[in-house]
Amino acid sequence: MTAFKRSQAKYVRKPYKTGNWPEYEAGLRQRGSLAVWISEDELKGWGPRKRGQRKPGGQEQYSNHAIETALTVGTVFHLGLRQTEAFLRSLFSVLNLDCRAPDVTTISRRARKLGRLSICRPAGKTPVHILIDSTGLSIHVGTLRKPPKNTESHTADRSPRVLIPPKKNAQVKPEVAALRKRNRNIRSRARLGKREWHTRSGCSRRSIVENTAYRYETIIGAAMRSRTLQGQRVEARVGCQILNTMAGPGMPEGHRVD
């Protein structure tokens, strides 16, 4: 193994340090707390609707919050639907709670009917920037829905606007249609510099969504469990809710150490 040369220092990734480690460490512990994933309000509305809120016909024995909570707990702790049923049943038994755990058939059937679960606050009239990443999630069927009307921009790692950073010694090639955008990126980065080009071109924003997709695949998983498109949409939204909940107790605030 050759010795490290001083001239190679500029190619070494800069180290980062977490400035709020005590708060972040406490947040990491909170992610394993059942109180974070099962609130008292959800337990109060666990069963069927009250008499004045019932609709004609057969009544559902579990609220939508109950089904959503079951899916959330199963996803967080990587449990199958049957294991989720047993987990909730044993939890209610230990705590002496007057709640019944939905069975595996009920969870699977009702999950497809949850519809649009809230992930974040609605954007309203403010511009929306959609960031897309080819996540590599293993799915059975899928489609991309029409974006909101107030969408201002799209950024994707496989979008018509190529934002792939050129290699260090990349050279401009003959100006053909397939290489026009690549050549544009090479000239632009040579003129602005690597760091400035990342900021102006939007490549830095693209890196953020790639990191988010990496967090989803690492924490939630790289494969969808549901075999229907409706179920996969609900499953993906539950996963996004989980990531947002995990970020609530605290996220690392890193700064580069020069």
Image (spheres, rainbow, N blue to C red):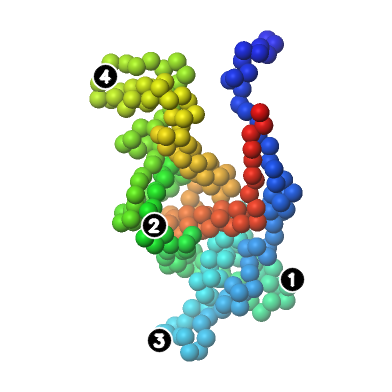
Q: Is residue 82 in view from this perspective?
A: no
Of pointers 1 and 3, the one earlier in the residue sequence:
3
Quadrant where the N terminus sits is: top right
In this picture, residue 66 sits left or right of residue 23 = left
Residue at the image point whose x is 53% and y is 47% from the top: 216
Of pointers 2 and 4, the one earlier in the residue sequence:
2
| Residue 121 place in picture, x, y as percent | 47, 62
In this picture, residue 256 sits left or right of residue 51 = right
Query: Splitting the image into 4 quarters, where does residue 77 fall?
Result: bottom right
Of pointers 4 and 1, the one earlier in the residue sequence:
1
In this picture, residue 246 sits left or right of residue 197 = right
| Residue 28 place in picture, x, y as percent | 69, 51
The one of 57 and 53 positioned closer to us in this rendering: 53
The dot on residue 56 is: 3
Of pointers 4 and 3, the one earlier in the residue sequence:
3
| Residue 249 place in picture, x, y as percent | 65, 56
| Alpha-carbon span between mark 4 and mark 1 | 70 Å
The answer to whether marks 1 and 2 mark residues whose Cβ atoms lie closer than 8 Å is: no
Amino acid type, mark 3: Pro
Q: Quick one: label 3, few (<14), some, or many (20+) residues within 10 Å? A: few
| Alpha-carbon span between mark 2 and mark 4 | 39 Å
| Alpha-carbon span between mark 1 and mark 3 | 35 Å
Amino acid type, mark 1: Val
Q: Which residue is mark 2?
A: 126
| Alpha-carbon span between mark 1 and mark 2 | 47 Å
The answer to whether marks 4 and 1 mark residues whose Cβ atoms lie closer than 8 Å is: no
Q: Which residue is mark 4?
A: 175
The one of 222 and 140 positioned closer to us in this rendering: 222
Indicate which label's residue lies in the foreground, 4 or 3. Answer: 4
The one of 3 and 11 positioned closer to us in this rendering: 11
The dot on residue 94 is: 1
